[in-house]
Image (cartoon, rainbow, N blue to C red):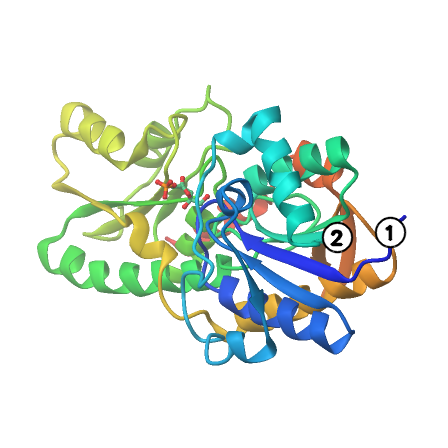
């Protein structure tokens, strides 16, 4: 095994608040431990297209509080091909990069696993996605900030929902996972959450409306996870207009505003700890693992586990939403 001297880092896939804090931590922990650091721009695309620069400790000054990613990010189709990955490996060698730290979600780790397997490159992943959908880590970087943004929005929508006595469907992101919708509903005191983890046979809308929904309140807020399974907020509103015309229904799709903003303290701390843990992992000779947080402790999760397994959502939390909305 070649001794690692230079570490390349990149952010890939959808950006998430706290990615900059992670880049800062990776850079500084690496330099502290005697490594050289290179920043790779635009995720895997920068590796394929050779957009790589030296990074010093001061290059990551004043970024801990900034949303987005200073390295920028992309979803790169070329990296999904063997030829693309070959180019990426050649560029790594050109820059004397011996190991990678990649920050992103499921797609980022899937690409990393493939690349590591083909070219025998040591890679450590850091879970960075607002979706919180990676197995093996209690939290992903960006999730807490997005959740706080959702809560902030729900608070504001509640004012107008109350004034007009309306039923609001608020659609939140999450790809195929309902973590943002479910915990956003609890934090925002919503009346219900509709999430894709609940079986497709179950008509969540009908259950909601026919079993005591709005018996005591004039306005209601329902958080809906984006997904073809839930039908999305638009789909549900359409159904209400047709099947329950007594409700005055409105829709808000929060969209990409959930991905921006200054990271919360929790995300900054998580990103800082995970960035430092990624360098510890490389020092210890770990490779092809994702850093996870398990009950506050930093752990190493093999890529195959993090990608293949589905993170389960606690169904008891839906009951909590239900109980607290009477
Ligand atoms: O994975 C993060 C995420 O924000 C998902 O919640 C969402 O489905 C997707 O990315 C949106 O991607 P894009 O910014 O490419 O439209």
Q: Which residue is mark 2?
A: 98
> Could one spot residue 28 in this view of the protein?
yes
Q: Position of residue 107 (x, y in %)?
A: 55, 37
Q: Quadrant of residue 39?
A: bottom right
Q: Which residue is mark 1?
A: 2
Q: Nearer the viewer, residue 183 or 64?
A: 64
Q: Position of residue 158 (x, y in %)?
A: 23, 60
Q: Nearer the viewer, residue 38 or 318?
A: 38
Q: Quadrant of residue 105?
A: top right
Above or below, comparing residue 70 to residue 125 in the picture: below
| Marks 2 and 1, the one that precedes in the sequence | 1
Q: How many C-alpha atoms fall within 10 Å of the one at disc 1: few (<14), some, or many (≥20)?
A: few
Label pair 2/1, CB-CB below 8 angstroms: yes
Q: Residue at x 44, y 75 (%)?
A: 65
Q: Residue at x 17, y 55 (%)?
A: 161
Q: Dot 2 lies on which element?
A: loop
Q: Nearer the viewer, residue 95 or 298?
A: 95
Say if disc 2 is inside 8 Å of ligand 1: no
Q: Dot 1 lies on which element?
A: loop
């Amino acid at each position: 095994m070649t001794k690692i001297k230079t570490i390349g880092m990149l952010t890939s896939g959808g950006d998430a608040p706290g990615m900059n804090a992670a880049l800062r931590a990776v850079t500084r922990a690496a330099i502290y431990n005697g490594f050289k650091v290179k920043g790779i721009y635009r995720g895997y695309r920068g590796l394929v297209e050779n957009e790589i620069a030296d990074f010093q400790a001061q290059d990551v000054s004043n970024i801990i509080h900034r949303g987005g990613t200073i390295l920028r990010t992309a979803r790169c189709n070329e990296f999904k091909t063997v030829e693309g990955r070959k180019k990426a490996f050649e560029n790594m060698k050109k820059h004397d990069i011996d190991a990678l730290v990649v920050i992103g979600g499921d797609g980022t780790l899937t690409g990393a696993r493939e690349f590591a397997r083909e070219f025998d490159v040591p890679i450590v992943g850091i879970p960075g996605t607002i979706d919180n959908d990676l197995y093996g880590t209690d939290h992903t970087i960006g999730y807490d900030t997005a959740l706080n943004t959702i809560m902030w929005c729900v608070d504001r929508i509640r004012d107008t929902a109350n004034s007009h006595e309306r039923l609001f469907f608020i659609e939140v992101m999450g790809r195929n996972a309902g973590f943002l919708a479910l915990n956003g509903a609890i934090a925002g005191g919503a009346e219900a959450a509709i999430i894709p983890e609940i079986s497709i046979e179950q008509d969540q809308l009908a259950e909601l409306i026919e079993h005591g929904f709005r018996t005591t309140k004039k306005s209601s807020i329902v958080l809906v996870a984006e997904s073809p399974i839930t039908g999305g907020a638009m789909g549900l509103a359409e159904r209400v207009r047709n099947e329950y015309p007594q409700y005055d229904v409105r829709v808000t799709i929060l969209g990409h505003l959930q991905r921006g903003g200054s990271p919360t303290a929790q995300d900054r701390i998580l990103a800082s700890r995970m960035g430092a843990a990624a360098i510890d992992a490389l020092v210890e000779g770990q490779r092809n693992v994702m850093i996870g947080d398990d009950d506050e402790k930093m752990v190493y999760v093999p890529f195959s586990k993090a990608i293949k397994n589905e993170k389960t959502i606690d169904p008891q939390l839906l009951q909590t939403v239900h109980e607290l909305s009477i």
